[in-house]
Amino acid sequence: MQYAFDIGGSKIEFGVFDDAGDIVLHSKTPTPSLDRNAFVAAVSNLIDEADLEFGERPNIGVSFAGGLDPQTGAVISANVPAIMGWCLETELSAILGRKVLVENDADCFALAEARTGVARDHRTVFGIILGTGVGGGIVVDGQFIGGRSGIRGEWGHGNDVTGGLIRNGLAPVKCGCGHTGCLDAWGGARGLEHIHAQTSGNRITSFDITDAWRSGDDVATRSIEIYCDLVSRELALMVNVLDPDCVPVGGGLASEPNLIAELDRMVRQRVLGRYDAPLVVPGQHSKDGGLRGASLLHDAVAVSDAKDGTEHA
């Protein structure tokens, strides 16, 4: 049995998975985002209740929206102020009296798809999130790609889509990271809504936009064309760099298969390599990939240790 958490700015999602990978308990509770003691209490209470119900004390995997400093283990770039700068793995392991492993939520999604989802049996997997913003995770041979900064797979930042915005008559906006021109501000659901608001003067939800697009609405069609142009150009670059076998998509926009199919078509037109079959596809675990990936973290570490001969006391 495995316990898993997916920690976001508004809610903590908790799941208990059995040996077959099926979820046998699932709950959600509001995130005490500003109070560390309340945060620890919320996590501890969920674990204590599960221990009583199942009579076991499994290890714990945690998925969260942020990164970890690889030198210190401290949380960086999190949307939960209560855990910023905190060595989440080490501290929670000590408080809870069992091993805790922590990874970024997009990485966990990519791991879930590589191990048990649409990308299983594929070697190189680039899992992307098209949710509120844009995220990504890279898994090769069932293992995460490492990095010295603790931030990886973040293809929504460090780029500049200003040229594409100007070409389509859109005004750039400042990204949450502080820079202007990042795809993150345009490649998620809020980005699609920004595009439609600027092109039509009407602010509606991303799902209303895609519904109108499927119905043949000209204005919504124009918004989708601009969106797919911006996203597919940046994603094609990532495909050229990584040469992935599969690009599963998570986040709210993954529930729009026609949109993902259009992105796939445009990406495969733009890349240098030849991809005869769909490459960019909706993830099998698009709704719970972070939680499910967190449940696989200890197994992933065990496999990695077995490959390199590492022994733990």
Image (cartoon, rainbow, N blue to C red):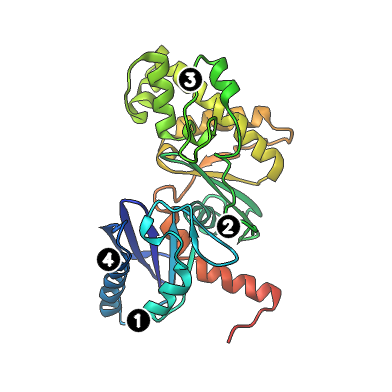
Would you name the residue on which mark 4 appears? 38
Q: Residue furthest bottom?
A: 313
* The image quarter in which residue 302 lies: bottom right
Disc 2 to disc 4, C-alpha distance: 26 Å
> Tags 3 and 2 in contact by the CB under 8 Å rule?
no
| Nearest the eye: 78 or 154 | 78
Quarter of the image where the C terminus is located: bottom right
In front: label 2 or label 1: 2
Please, what secondary structure does the residue beneath circle 4 have?
Answer: helix
**Mark nearer the N terminus (3 vs 1):** 1
Please, what secondary structure does the residue beneath circle 2 have?
Answer: loop
Disc 3 to disc 2, C-alpha distance: 32 Å
Q: Above or below — where is 70 with respect to 302?
A: above
**Mark nearer the N terminus (4 vs 1):** 4
| Nearest the eye: 265 or 189 | 189
Q: Which circle marks residue 150 in the picture?
A: 2
Crowding at mark 1 (Cα within 10 Å: few <14, some 14-19, many 20+)? few
What's the residue type where badge 1 is placed?
Glu
| Nearest the eye: 55 or 284 | 55
> Tags 3 and 1 in contact by the CB under 8 Å rule?
no
> Tags 2 and 1 in contact by the CB under 8 Å rule?
no
Q: Position of residue 147 (x, y in %)?
A: 64, 57
What's the residue type where badge 3 is placed?
Ala
| Nearest the eye: 187 or 75 | 75
Please, what secondary structure does the residue beneath circle 1 have?
Answer: loop
Would you name the residue on which mark 1 appears? 56
**Mark nearer the N terminus (4 vs 3):** 4
